[in-house]
Amino acid sequence: MIPSKSPVLSGDFSYARVPQPFHWQQLVQADERLILSPSQFFERWAITKAQMARLCFCSPTTVTRWMTECAYHQDPGEEYKFRLGYVDNLWSMKKCN
């Protein structure tokens, strides 16, 4: 049960910390470390294009467009590169148990 004096319920956020410029810089630096292109991901992990499509929530055709040098080549968006970087980071972590 949430107490009636909860700051979330009352809208009182006077206790909250204000992010400083270095907080925002840390976030940008973390984002930059998490950017990974599809070709870099394929170099690190032995997966298929279908598996990459599943990781990126896109179609295998989209992944093929990223990897081809033909006229229908398409650059992956930053959201896809970030997702691949995030997955790489997650999969690269050492198992705790």
Image (cartoon, rainbow, N blue to C red):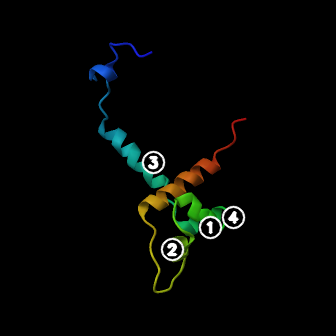
Locate residue 5 relative to residue 59 in the image: left or right.
left
Q: Position of residue 28 (x, y in %)?
A: 39, 49
- The mark closer to the camera, 2 or 1, is 1
* Residue type at numbered disc 4: Ala
Could you tell which of marks 3 and 2 lies nearer the N-terminus? 3
Which type of secondary structure does the marked residue at label 2 adopt? helix
Which type of secondary structure does the marked residue at label 3 adopt? helix
Give me the C-alpha separation between circle 2 and circle 1: 13 Å
- The mark closer to the camera, 3 or 2, is 2
Residue furthest toward the right?
Answer: 97
Against 57, is 3 above or below? Answer: above
Residue 30's disc is 3
- Can residue 52 be seen here? The reply is yes
Give me the C-alpha separation between circle 3 and circle 4: 25 Å
- The mark closer to the camera, 1 or 4, is 1
Residue 46's disc is 4
Q: Quadrant of residue 19?
A: top left
* Residue type at numbered disc 2: Trp
Residue 50's disc is 1
Query: How busy is the neighbourhood of tag 1: few (under 14 within 10 Å), some, or many (20 plus)?
Result: some
Q: Are marks 3 and 2 in contact (CB under 8 Å)?
A: no
Q: Are marks 2 and 1 in contact (CB under 8 Å)?
A: no
- The mark closer to the camera, 3 or 4, is 4
- The mark closer to the camera, 3 or 1, is 1
